[in-house]
Amino acid sequence: MVRTFHSLRRADPGFNPRDALSLRITIPPAQVKDATAVIQLEQAILEKMRAIAGVQSVGLTTLIPTQPGGSDLVYARDQSYRQSLPPLRRLKFVSPGLLTAMGNRLIAGREFT
């Protein structure tokens, strides 16, 4: 168990957890019912966080790495699920700037826009 713990401490998680801060923001549907208004509120929150002295980058996501999270059922319009449920899929929404904020290394492609 001690060797496993030591190995886990040296493992590369694929992001840089140093100097990173995460927090959970919940926008209750009862308060903001319009999806566009929710996006605008999230954008305003991001802008206010970027304006804080010392903040280098910010991003939003529904699930951060190593955080336990549930899966969502994804239904395909052209499929029938009478006898079984669709496969479970993990959906993750991310905003531009998240990869930089998390310290992720981009191996190929570009940052989300």
Image (tube, rainbow, N blue to C red):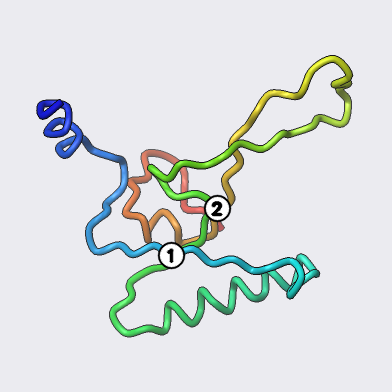
State which quadrant residue 45 falls in. Answer: bottom right
State which quadrant residue 4 falls in. Answer: top left
Q: Quadrant of the C terminus?
A: bottom right
Q: Is residue 23 above or below residue 15?
A: below
Residue 67 relative to residue 96: left or right: left
Q: Which residue is mark 2?
A: 62
Q: Nearer the viewer, residue 53 or 112?
A: 53
Q: Quadrant of the N terminus?
A: top left
Q: Position of residue 108 (x, y in %)?
A: 41, 39
Amino acid marked by disc 1: Leu
Q: Position of residue 64 (x, y in %)?
A: 44, 50
Q: Which residue is mark 1?
A: 23
The local secondary structure at tag 1 comes to loop
Q: Nearer the viewer, residue 64 or 2?
A: 2
Q: Residues within 10 Å of mark 2 (few under 14, many from 20)?
A: few
Residue 15 relative to residue 77: left or right: left
Q: Which residue is drawn at the image coordinates 58% and 79% (left, top)?
A: 44
Q: Position of residue 71 (x, y in %)?
A: 61, 36
Q: Nearer the viewer, residue 110 or 35?
A: 35
Q: Residues within 10 Å of mark 1 (few under 14, many from 20)?
A: few
Q: Which residue is drawn at the image coordinates 73% and 34% (left, top)?
A: 74
Q: Is residue 111 above or below residue 41?
A: above
- Earlier in the chain: of badge 1 and badge 2, it is 1
